[in-house]
Amino acid sequence: MSSERLKILTANADIPGIETFEVYRKHGGYTAVEKAVKTMTPDAVVEEVKKSGVRGRGGAGFPMGMKWSFLAKPEGVPRYLVCNGDESEPGTFKDHWLMKTIPHLLIEGMIVSSFALGANTSYIYVRGELMYVVKILEKAIAEAKAAGFLGKNILGSGYDLELYVQPGGGAYICGEETALLESLEGKRGNPRNKPPFPAVKGLYQCPTVVNNVESISTTPWIVNNGGEAYAAVGIGRSTGTKLISASGHLKKPGVYEIPLGITVNEFIYSDEWCGGIRDGHHLKAVVAGGSSVPILPAALLLKTANGEDRLMTYESLADGGFATGTMLGSGGFIAMDETSCIVRNTWNFSRFYHHESCGQCSPCREGTGWMEKVLHRIEHGHGSMHDIDLLVDVSKKIEGNTICPLGDAAAWPVASAIRHFRDEFEWHIKFPQEATRPGAVYRGHMELA
């Protein structure tokens, strides 16, 4: 099967009324549920997901089939599937788009995945600000239940499943799976120490799998077409397609489903995708996977350290480590042209992470605040050259020293911004009057594309 331009998630997105059960069903919807519960065993579904090589689309990129295989199965203990629809990462909005546009695709994915995991009660946790999406999903669940695809004895198979939508409280930290579980249980969304991992003790201390919206939405296609067919799409260990939230100074921002393996250059400049940088401007830098991943200057974003074209894959974007690479992450692709101020953007990201830190770990609780204050000082013309090294030092003391990855997410953007754009930070400090002038942008040495 050719991987070129294959649409796995968005093939029917433009069909009028696709958000309704009737139209979704008419275009092949819920055939994966029929196939799974009538002709396959749960283990067979898990095996197809393993064969597909699909990796978690929420940011971590861990193989989904392997994660499923870790689920403990003690006798007489319920198991749960929880869908992480919190999507709080700045620059990422593809899950939001998917839930509101094709809600039944996620519902079908939840049924198939729950069947595979032996879960009889499952949850979709949605960011609290998106209450209208909660209502869309609840309507879709009611339609599916009325048609016999949810509830008792689904399609006469003997398999039961109840599916619920739970709005969150609007906290970024609840995108971390154990904090999400705490919130789902009605507690404050603080991450848990691990181990034990959710696969052993998750929701209500029972075995639980937590997967992202996009990840779960791939399972109907995998069941219908086979894991090997999915693995044939993409390249290497980056199999399948990926939804990208493209924003910033692009001619055509939006949500795109790309086959993993196209070049970054093609994604940015092809008319099929983003159409290039806005007229009269040039690419300066990109945050490729949401605000928590290292920022890269244009030259390193388009080419690896070895001069090869960088690909839209987990491996290629990470090539060279954080010295010359970044992460695909959640696919929040933010493009910045030469009018962007790196210092201002870094300060803005730091404000976000300081505000969203749960405060449980002192390196994150204190360190994010220190970084925000120092960046504010530099951006507003009161910085010193010592502040640059201080930021690097604080970021190192946060990274790897917290219960959850929020500390890393706060540290990486600061460290990478200084690593690649140190001269811009120095300009703010050496020429504060010019740097703080409204609309002022650094015009020093920049490699633009």
Image: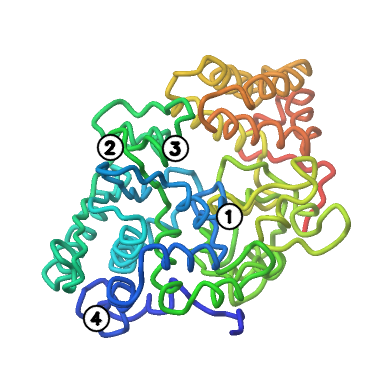
Mark toward the viewer: 3 or 4:
3
**Under tag 1, what secondary structure?**
strand
Q: Label 3 sits on what residue type?
A: Glu
Residue identified by numbered label 1: 333
Per the model, the C-alpha gap separating discs 3 and 1 is 20 Å
- Is 254 or 133 nearer to us in this picture? 133
Give the mark nearest the N terminus, 4 or 2.
4
Residue identified by numbered label 2: 184
Q: Which residue appears farthest toward the right when viewing the image?
A: 306
Q: Position of residue 168 (x, y in %)?
A: 29, 39
Vertical side of 337 occupied by 442: above or below: above
Residue identified by numbered label 3: 176
Q: Are marks 1 and 2 in contact (CB under 8 Å)?
A: no
Give the mark nearest the N terminus, 3 or 2.
3
Residue 11 figure quarter: bottom left
For the residue carrying disc 4, how many other residues have a C-alpha within 10 Å: few (<14), some (14-19), or many (20+)? some
Residue in the image at 51% along x and 25% along y? 403
Q: Label 1 sits on what residue type?
A: Phe
Give the mark nearest the N terminus, 1 or 2.
2
Q: Position of residue 181 (x, y in %)?
A: 34, 36
**Under tag 2, what secondary structure?**
helix
Residue in the image at 31% along x and 84% along y? 27
Q: Position of residue 80 (x, y in %)?
A: 30, 47
Q: Quadrant of the N terminus?
A: bottom right
Residue identified by numbered label 4: 23
